[in-house]
């Protein structure tokens, strides 16, 4: 009701030979979760890479999958013992997927970009890392909520933060942790809808009145979704920063809606991905907009080698002025 699912937490899971009954949804799930095994999984991959190199043969001879062993972000998460304990809880079982180390590395990369933006905005936490203070984070197309989960787990103290996840998943399918932490909220919305912009603007103004600085983030925003995130950033002036980690390029049909972006023929399979990243940087800078004045945005584009993907571009835009 009203996009809200209220869950009552009982004493804990009931173990049954590496499976347990979730006390919230009553489903029988694998437990301990895959999150609790990320360090042993990392060590297993490191041994394989040492023996066989960093590529494994895929399903076809032409396709090879790279094995990533960068572990800075994973070690940072493990070092925060309380946050890691929270993330290993059974109420986080919906966050699981087959490539959890990849998801962690990408979410941590985005959150480090957020923390750096906070430093430039003068609201960085005193502890460094991704300790956040006085922020309202809007996580567009949040999916299973890995980024929001890490935000909540690593910022459970009295800091004046609020984290809003937005996706099209029905409220009853949303990971339970969102409903057990007052700092977290979920909206079931279509990110491409015009109505969302007006609703989001209202929420942003409410959060500003509570002393929080709004920051918009988008990880794995495929095609036009990244462009839509920039539309929100342009139109809601109270949002002070945007962090994008783009994924798939626009489809051929969607490309007709982007007159200033054109794919190019190239031997490098990542050529058009980085062409797309540069286009998004230009969009934030206002190069293709009549409504954004030159110099209003401070925008950077860089790659993060700690992320377990070749599509590791990060675009950070800061709004200049008050």
Image (cartoon, grey):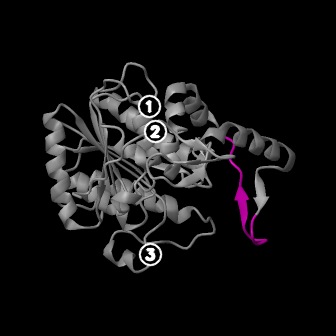
Packing grade of label 3 (10 A; few <14, some 14-19, many >=20) is few
**Position in image of residue 162 (x %, y %):** 28, 38
Q: Residue at x 44, y 42 (%)?
A: 149
Label 2, secondary structure: give it. helix
Packing grade of label 2 (10 A; few <14, some 14-19, many >=20) is many
> In this image, 44 relative to 292: left or right?
right
**Position in image of residue 264 (x %, y %):** 50, 72
- Give me the C-alpha separation between circle 1 and circle 3: 36 Å
Q: Which residue is mark 1?
A: 154
Residue 107 or 224: which is nearer the viewer? 107
- Give me the C-alpha separation between circle 1 and circle 2: 6 Å
Give the prevailing secondary structure in the magenta stretch.
loop
* Disc 1 to disc 3: CB gap under 8 Å: no
Q: Which residue is mark 2?
A: 150
- Image quadrant holding the N terminus, namely bottom left
Q: Residue at x 68, y 47 (%)?
A: 68
Q: Residue at x 37, y 53 (%)?
A: 281
**Position in image of residue 199 (x %, y %):** 17, 56
| Residue extending farthest top | 126
* Disc 3 to disc 2: CB gap under 8 Å: no
Span of residues in magenta = 58-70
Q: Which mark is residue 251?
A: 3
Tell me, yes or no, if residue 300 can be seen here. Answer: no
- Give me the C-alpha separation between circle 3 and circle 2: 31 Å
Packing grade of label 1 (10 A; few <14, some 14-19, many >=20) is many
Circle nearer the viewer, 3 or 2: 2
| Residue extending farthest right | 51
> In this image, 288 relative to 68: left or right?
left
Sequence-wise, the earlier of marks 3 and 2 is 2
Residue 258 or 179: which is nearer the viewer? 179
The quarter holding residue 212 reads top left
**Position in image of residue 122 (x %, y %):** 28, 26
């Amino acid at each position: 009701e009203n996009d809200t699912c209220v869950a009552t937490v009982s004493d804990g899971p009931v173990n049954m030979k590496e499976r347990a009954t979730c006390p919230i949804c009553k489903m029988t799930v694998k437990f301990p979760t895959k999150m609790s095994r990320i360090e042993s999984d990392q060590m297993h991959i490191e041994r394989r890479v040492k023996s066989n190199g960093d590529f494994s043969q895929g399903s076809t001879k032409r396709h090879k999958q790279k094995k990533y062993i960068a572990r800075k972000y994973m070690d940072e998460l493990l070092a925060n013992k309380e946050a890691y304990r929270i993330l290993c809880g059974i109420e986080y079982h919906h966050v699981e997927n087959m490539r959890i180390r990849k998801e962690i590395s990408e979410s941590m990369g985005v959150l480090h970009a957020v923390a750096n933006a906070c430093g430039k905005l003068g609201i960085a936490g005193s502890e460094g890392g991704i300790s956040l203070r006085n922020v309202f984070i809007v996580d567009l197309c949040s999916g299973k909520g890995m980024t929001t989960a890490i935000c909540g787990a690593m910022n459970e103290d009295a800091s004046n933060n609020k984290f809003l996840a937005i996706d099209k998943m029905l409220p009853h399918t949303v990971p339970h942790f969102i409903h057990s932490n007052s700092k977290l909220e979920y909206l079931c919305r279509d990110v491409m809808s015009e109505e969302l912009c007006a609703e989001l603007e209202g929420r942003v103004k409410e959060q500003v009145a509570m002393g929080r600085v709004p920051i918009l983030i988008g990880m794995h925003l495929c095609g036009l979704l990244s462009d839509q995130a920039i539309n929100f950033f342009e139109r809601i002036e109270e949002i002070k920063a945007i962090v994008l980690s783009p994924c798939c390029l626009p489809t051929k049909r969607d490309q007709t809606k982007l007159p200033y972006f054109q794919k190019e023929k190239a031997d490098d399979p990542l050529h058009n991905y980085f062409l797309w990243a540069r286009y998004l940087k230009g969009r934030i800078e206002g190069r293709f907009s009549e409504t954004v004045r030159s110099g209003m945005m401070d925008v950077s584009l860089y790659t993060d080698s700690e992320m377990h993907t070749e599509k590791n571009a990060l675009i950070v835009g800061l709004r200049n002025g008050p």
